[in-house]
Image (cartoon, rainbow, N blue to C red):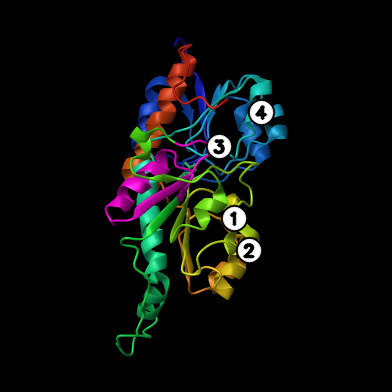
Amino acid sequence: MNDKPVVLVTRKLPDAVEKKLAEQFIPLLNPDDRLYDTGELLQLAENADAILPCHTEKFDADTIANLPARVKAIANFSVGVDHVDLEAARRKQVIVTNTPDVLSDATAEIAMLLMLGAARRASEGEHIMRNQLWKDWSPAFMVGRQITGKRLGILGMGRVGQVVAARARGFDMTIHYHNRQPLNPDHAGDATYHDSVEGLLANVDVLSIHCPASDATRGLLNRERLATMHRDAILVNTSRGGVIDDDALVEALQTGVIAAAGLDVFNGEPDAIHPGYRQLDNVFLLPHIGSATRETRDAMGFRAIDNLVAIFSGREPGDRVA
Ligand code: 8YV
């Protein structure tokens, strides 16, 4: 690289990441971690050769069309890229990268936490403790469901799904999955493949969603599909809220179509999520913290920097998605 390229960093990143970025680039940082609106973003981008955004910044077709010609790349600090119109980026010849692999362990931990939290009624337990409502103990008190030895269905057996499968095997769960194509045996291990979503849903006790949000998966978990699940089933989502039809899931949880849910991602994040979830005892809710560990945040930043270095050295970046 000759002159240091300028990188617009849209959110506050870990100190180690910002320091490393400054070794090879001129970063335009956001120390106050303010959420930029599209107008501000485009204005700041006037002085940038690349943007390093999070999923909180939306790059729809209009925004991409209006990016200054100087911007060569969008190097995301995320594995999900549903906030970027990839087709529009291709048209404008803006390179887009993501950060796969490095958040699989952290996200799998949250999927297990959600499974356990939903199965063992963690929200209710916390509520009771924090509000001094614990007055008695009896064998019938706070009885939940056990996940040990149950059938886990993984919808989208990619990198994160495979780590969840490995963790769940530690709970003696049997693994079922649906992908468009079966995995090769090295990756699938002992997992049972289902060639349809419906086939998976009907045969599992816990469903963990790991497929990306796209036109093909939007609202996939709708009323009809939820109705095919076991009445004792637990649904867990660490992928994207868009995969779920919220009205249908809230109704299914209210009426006992399924038993419980653990959710880390939502339509309308952060402040316009379906109000029905907050009213339900049988949901365990977290605020999109799947990858929120120190180790993973650093690794995501370093991975985004690796992609930028490759781009500005004229090499193909490792994680190019457009
Ligand atoms: C990230 C995520 O924290 O990487 C993803 O796709 O969903 C999260 O875990 C977030 O997107 C950061 O931009």
Q: Position of residue 87 (x, y in %)?
A: 66, 28
Residue farthest left in this picture: 170
Q: Are marks 3 and 1 in contact (CB under 8 Å)?
A: no
Q: Name the side, left or right, on which 199 lies relative to 124.
A: right
* Image location of residue 70, percent across then percent down: 62, 19
Residue 66 seen? no
Q: Quadrant of residue 16?
A: top left
Tell me the element at label 3.
loop
Q: Which residue is mark 2?
A: 248
The quarter in which the N terminus is drawn is top left
* Front in this rendered view, residue 182 or 264: 182
Q: CA distance from mark 3 to mark 1?
A: 20 Å
Amino acid, disc 4 = Glu
User: Disc 4 or disc 1, which is closer to the eye?
Assistant: 1
N-term mark: 2 or 3: 3
Q: Which amino acid does the dot numbered 1 rest on?
A: Leu
Residue 243: percent from left, percent from top:
58, 50
Alpha carbons under labels 4 and 1: distance apart: 26 Å
- Asked if the residues shown at circle 2 and circle 1 are in contact, with their CB atoms under 8 angstroms apart, the answer is yes
Is disc 1 placed on a helix, strand or loop? Answer: loop
Q: Please give the residue where the numbered disc 3 appears in the rendered image.
A: 81
For the residues labelled 4 and 3, the Cα–Cα distance comes to 12 Å
